[in-house]
Image (cartoon, rainbow, N blue to C red):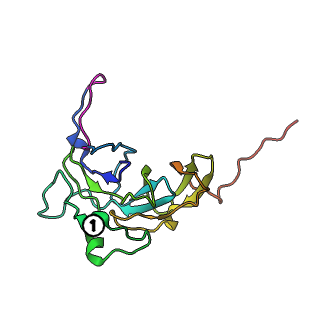
């Protein structure tokens, strides 16, 4: 969501409905929050989250199933007042304990409020988009002023969920990221198609 929440649940939890129905709730939105994207979780891939002020991060999806003995839950663990008020640096590494607990997206019941995916602050701004990626993929970033940057996802640091991310694009004054798109890598070794001779 734009306020940095994410929920992972099984597709089997979404019952089939007709075209003229409301559908079923995927995530419980709090306040003015809104959905910004949806992806299929790749156990061997990463979730790329990008914020409007040029920050982003990639975090491993992790395995599909819960850890042994860990029940499905509807809501994230409560965040303390101290944690909410803290403003760590975007590049500040997590502690080992934080890293173990936040480097994954555990599967939950559909309709909960989810887990904190990214720490949204005045420094990184609201979330504008997400993408399911793997190593070697490339991403195009587009701003509201029409600027574009093409980047390798391998250049974006892997960090845990409850972090601000790292800078992925330098923006001009007043500019903001508007969207992102995963693009196919170029195959430089692919031969060019033969052109028939003209008469």
Within-10-Å neighbours for mark 1: few <14, some 14–19, many 20+? few
User: Residue extending furthest right?
Assistant: 199
Residue at left 30%, top 62%? 62
Which one is in front, 156 or 93? 93
Image position of 1 (left or right of 178): left
Q: Is residue 56 above or below residue 195?
A: below
User: Residue extending furthest top?
Assistant: 20
- Please identify the dominant SS of the magenta region: loop
Tag 1, which secondary structure?
A: helix
Residue at left 50%, top 56%? 53
Which one is in front, 113 or 100? 113
Query: In the figure, residue 104 lies in which quadrant?
Result: bottom left
Q: Is residue 21 magenta?
A: yes
Residue 83 location (% of width, % of height) = 27, 66
Which one is in front, 143 or 48? 143
Residue at left 33%, top 63%? 162
Q: Which residues are magenta?
A: 18-28
Residue 192 location (% of width, % of height) = 71, 51
Image position of 94 (left or right of 75): right
Residue 61 location (% of width, % of height) = 33, 59
Residue 7 location (% of width, % of height) = 28, 50
Query: In the figure, residue 22 lies in which quadrant?
Result: top left
Q: Is residue 26 above or below residue 16?
A: below
Q: Is residue 42 magenta?
A: no
The residue beneath circle 1 is 83
The image quadrant where one finds the C terminus is: top right
């Amino acid at each position: 969501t734009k306020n940095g929440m994410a929920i992972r649940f099984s597709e089997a939890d979404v019952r089939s409905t007709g075209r003229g129905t409301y559908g079923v709730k995927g995530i419980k939105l709090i306040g003015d929050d809104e959905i910004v994207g949806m992806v299929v979780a790749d156990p061997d891939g990463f979730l790329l989250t990008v914020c409007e002020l040029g920050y982003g991060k990639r975090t491993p999806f992790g395995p599909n199933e819960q850890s042994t003995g860990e029940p499905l839950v509807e809501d994230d663990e409560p965040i303390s007042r101290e944690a909410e008020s803290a403003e760590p640096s975007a590049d500040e590494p997590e502690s080992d304990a934080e890293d173990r607990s936040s480097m994954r997206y555990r599967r939950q019941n559909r309709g909960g409020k989810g887990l904190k995916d990214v720490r949204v602050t005045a420094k990184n701004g609201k979330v504008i988009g997400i993408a399911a990626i793997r190593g070697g993929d490339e991403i195009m970033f587009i701003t509201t002023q029409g600027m574009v940057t093409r980047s390798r996802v391998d250049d974006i640091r892997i960090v845990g969920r409850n972090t601000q991310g790292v800078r992925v694009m330098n923006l001009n004054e007043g500019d903001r990221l508007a969207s992102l798109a995963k693009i196919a890598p170029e195959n430089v070794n692919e031969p060019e198609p033969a052109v028939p001779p003209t008469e």
